[in-house]
Structures are given as C-alpha cells and as structure tokens.
Amino acid sequence: MSVRVLVTGGTGLVGQGIEYVIENEPANSHFGKRDGEEWFFIGSSEADLRNQEQTRKLFEKYKPTHVIHLAALVGGLFANMARKLDFLRDNILINDNVLHTAHEFKVKKVISCLSTCVYPDKVEYPLDETKIHLGLPHESNFGYAHAKRLVDIQNRAYKDQFGDNFTSAIPTNVFGPHDNFDMESAHVLPALIHRCYLSKKNNTPFVVWGSGKPLRQFIYSRDLAKLFVWMLRNYDSVEPLILSVGEDEEVSIKQAADAVVNAVGFTGEYRFDTTKADGQFRKPASNKKLLELVKDTGFAFTPFDKALDETVQWFLRNYNNARIGKPQ
C-alpha cells in the first residue's frame, strides 16, 4: 500500500527541514524516504487553508494517507499583540479545515505542530506534556495560543468519537535554513544572524538587546524534521509530544550571540544594550518522554555550534532569496 504524505506549510522553516531530511538521509532508514512513499510539500500559494473548499480540493488533488500539518498564521510579539483576533480566528479556521477534511478523507494519521506558547503563563517548570491546559496562556499571544490549544482538544475529540489517529508535536525554539530573517518579525537567532551580518557589511557595532543572560532551548530544524518523520511512522498516541533538546542543553542569549559572531566572522565592536528588556529568563521543557521513545533509533541532536554555523552559511549563500524583509 502506497503512503502519500501531505505536508501543509511545506515551504517554511520546518517543512523545508523535513524535505531536506527525506531527500538526504539514507533511503529506507529511520528518517530517510522509504519505498512506496510519496511526499508533497505545499505552501499557501497552492491553497488558502482558511477556505474549506480550497482545503477539500487540495485533499482531492493529493489524496494523502498521512498529513503533517505545519501551516499557521504566525508572527512576532508585536503582531500577536496587535491582531489577537486574526491569530485566533485564522488558525482556528486552518486547523478545523485540515483536521475535518483529513477525517472525511479517512487519512490514517495527522500530526499537527503546536508551540510552547500554548503553555500557561504561570506554571511549574519544567514544562511537560501534562501541563498544557493548567492555566491561561500569556496575554501577549493568547489568540494564537488558544487556537493551538484547541488542536489538542480536537485531536482528542476525533479520537474519542471516531477513532481517528490525530496527534500533535510541541517543538521548542526552532532555527535553521529557510528561517524568517526579517528583523521586524524574526525570532531571536535569525534576528541576531541578520543583524550581525549587516554590522559586518556596514562596519558598524553589533548590538544585542538585553543582558544576554536569558536561557533558551534551541532545536535545529533538520533535527526536528527527523523527529517529525519518526513520529509519523512510530507514534500513535493522541497525547502531544515535546520535541526539544534537554534542559541541560539550554543556551544563553550571550552564548548564542558569541556563536553568531564566530560563524559570521565578525571582528568589530560587539556589546549588549542592557537598557533593553530581557523577556522571560527561562522556560525549560522536559524531553524525557521523547528520549525514552527514540533511544533505539540512533537519533542524536546536532551540536548547537555546528547547527548554527550551517544556518549562517545557508543564510550567507542565499541572502538575496532569503526572507529578509525590507533591504537594509
């Protein structure tokens, strides 16, 4: 029986990571493409998933047996705060259309991508899979967070009422090739990479906002991609699964900035602007459940410095075609 995998949001950071892994890992391995598999990576230009009819036509075209659902309306802090209803409503529409159409087409498995922002603002750390619904998410992104939480509720309802095999993954801070490097909306690592590149190009100081002390768990998009492929083939629980490096692999913003400076080859003035806010000091997530499940697969996380260097080299090679926003 052929396996037809549809990846929504397939042209973004994680989707491109999955495509890279599928094509570059050894065929028929734990993470490489297997005989009888066909993979389809689609972006928003092919279908507006907020539209039920367009979603249905997409499924009719590709006839997927499996879906990795990455598509979402995403944005930085300011966009999330300014457009809470857009982030709530658009993501509810996207997720409901994908899940219900997958149910109607009798798709064997759907894995949806959530985010650690679904967790309560006030919660005991480390985060784990049992704590998603224990309180309200942070006010700044409550539209996006509530829409993503609903995916977990929907997965459980489809399983309970129809026996559908729908589940979800919760990555921590993802980075890698094909990231969003637009400094207006980028997350911390791609923003640091782009800013450092411009400092080198323009011979200006590289200034990092904040003290550099906060800690984050960064996961390389190509490592995350392997874990999505593994989940697709092996994970059949409705319970969400955190996909992250361990708490012992937290990296400070200063360590990240130092690594960016080395990878970019920047030798100019480099300092921290401590008048700028740091944000949350740390929000560690436990990957104990994940490590127990993948212990026999040979999976290993790429060392942070190596993954960052690969990301920087990709950015430098593809600067003119990368998502960089307005020319600087």
Image: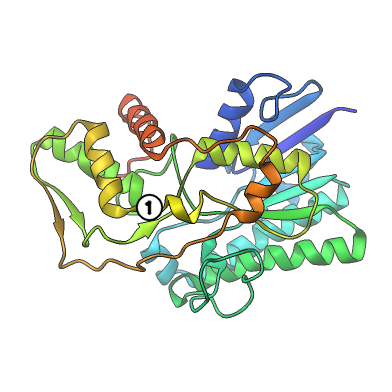
Q: Is residue 126 left or right of residue 229?
A: left
Mark 1 surroundings within 10 Å by alpha-carbon count, few (fewer than 14), some (14 through 19), many (20 or more): some
Give the quarter of the image for residue 223. Answer: top right
**Residue 176 in the image: above or below residue 129:** above
Quadrant of image for the N terminus: top right
The answer to whether residue 58 is visible is no
Question: x, y (%) of residue 239?
Answer: 74, 60
Q: As displayed, is residue 5 above or below residue 129?
A: above
Is 318 on the left-hand or right-hand side of 109? left
Pick whichever, 295 or 12, lies toward us: 295
Q: Residue at x 19, y 30 (%)?
A: 265
Nearest to the observer: residue 88 or residue 50: 88
Q: Which residue is located at x 58 percent, y 43 percent?
A: 44
Image coordinates for residue 142, horizontal then vertical, percent: 51, 73
Q: Which x, y percent locates residue 124?
A: 52, 75
Residue displayed at 40% across by 40% down: 304
Relative height, residue 325 to residue 152 (above, below): above
Q: How many marks?
A: 1
**Viewer-closest of 78 and 239:** 239
Is residue 70 among what the camera can see? yes
Q: Name which residue type carries label 1.
A: His
Residue pointed to by mark 1: 187
Q: How is the image coloured?
A: rainbow
Taking the image as shown, residue 158 lies to the left or right of residue 77, namely right
**Spot occupied by residue 328 in the image (x, y as percentages of width and height):** 20, 41
Q: Nearer the viewer, residue 96 or 204?
A: 204
Q: Residue 226 occupies which quadrant of the picture?
A: top right
- Label 1 element class: loop
Horizontal side of 185 relative to 212 (left or right) equals right
**Residue at 21% across / 62% down in the picture?**
211
